[in-house]
Amino acid sequence: MRTTRSATEKKPARTRKPALHPDIREVLYTQEEIAAKVKTMAAQISRDYAGKEVILVCVLKGAAVFLADLMRQLTVPCIVDYVNWSSYGTSTSSSGVFRILQDLEESVESRHVLIVEDIIDTGLTLHYLLRHIRGRNPASVKVAALLDKPSKRKIEVHTDYCGFKVPDEFVVGYGLDYDQKYRNLPFVGVLRPEIYAGSDTPPDKP
């Protein structure tokens, strides 16, 4: 028989991990948790691409750390390429206008492409990048993202491999930044609000 929670019983509170940096309010995912998740994702990707060569397209700058760890766990042949699309300056919100700062060097025509992203939030960057790559006639295009923040979605996009669903918080670390800082933190944590206080707009992406 299924038991129900009594009206007076409270849900257990999420245990906060201690912050390891003075600007971090809370650690969401530790270095060890991220490593375990990346290993699991790499195993699934290797199974799905067995017998194939895949082009890993890293979205700079945030996904560089994730890419480095992910590709070292893959057991299939892979080639690495990079794109850099800009819509964020020191502001904490997307303008919705994108500039290609660095395009692919490899031809993706008739080849298997895996886009490697740090975080999917509004979905705008990924939407335009997918359209950009699909216009070059690849054999397939899939997406691997370490983090997904669906609460900020402005356009629906599909992620084939996802590490963690993150709450509506301003997160940094493990490649993610605020004003080009905190990328070197080995964990993913929530930035203290006073750090970005006074920014033009409320944060929706680090």
Image: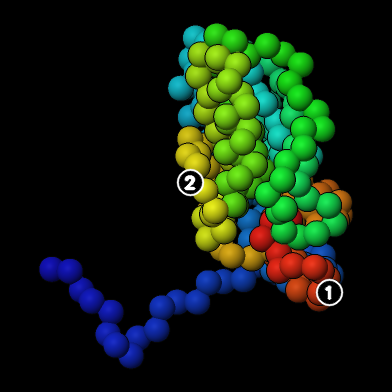
Q: Residue at x 62, y 27 (%)?
A: 132
- The colour scheme applied to this rendered structure is rainbow
Quarter placement of the C terminus: bottom right
Q: Nearer the viewer, residue 124 or 166?
A: 124
State the SS at label 2: loop
> Could you say which disc has been placed on residue 156 in the image?
2
> Could you say which disc has been placed on residue 198 in the image?
1
Find residue 15 and report its horizontal and vertical position in percent.
56, 71
Location of residue 133 (image quadrant): top right
Q: Residue at x 64, y 42 (%)?
A: 125
Quarter placement of the N terminus: bottom left
Left-right relation of 165 to 59: left
Left-right relation of 198 to 65: right
The residue lying furthest to the front in this view is: 97
Q: Residue at x 47, y 39 (%)?
A: 158
Find residue 78 and report its horizontal and vertical position in percent.
64, 16
Q: Residue at x 33, y 90 (%)?
A: 8
Q: Residues within 10 Å of mark 2 (few under 14, many from 20)?
A: few
Amino acid at the residue labelled 2: Glu
Q: Nearer the viewer, residue 204 or 58?
A: 204
Left-right relation of 45 to 17: left
Q: CA distance from mark 2 to mark 1?
A: 30 Å
Q: Is residue 1 visible?
A: yes
Q: Is residue 171 visible?
A: no
Find residue 117 and report its horizontal and vertical position in percent.
65, 39
Q: Nearer the viewer, residue 169 or 93?
A: 93
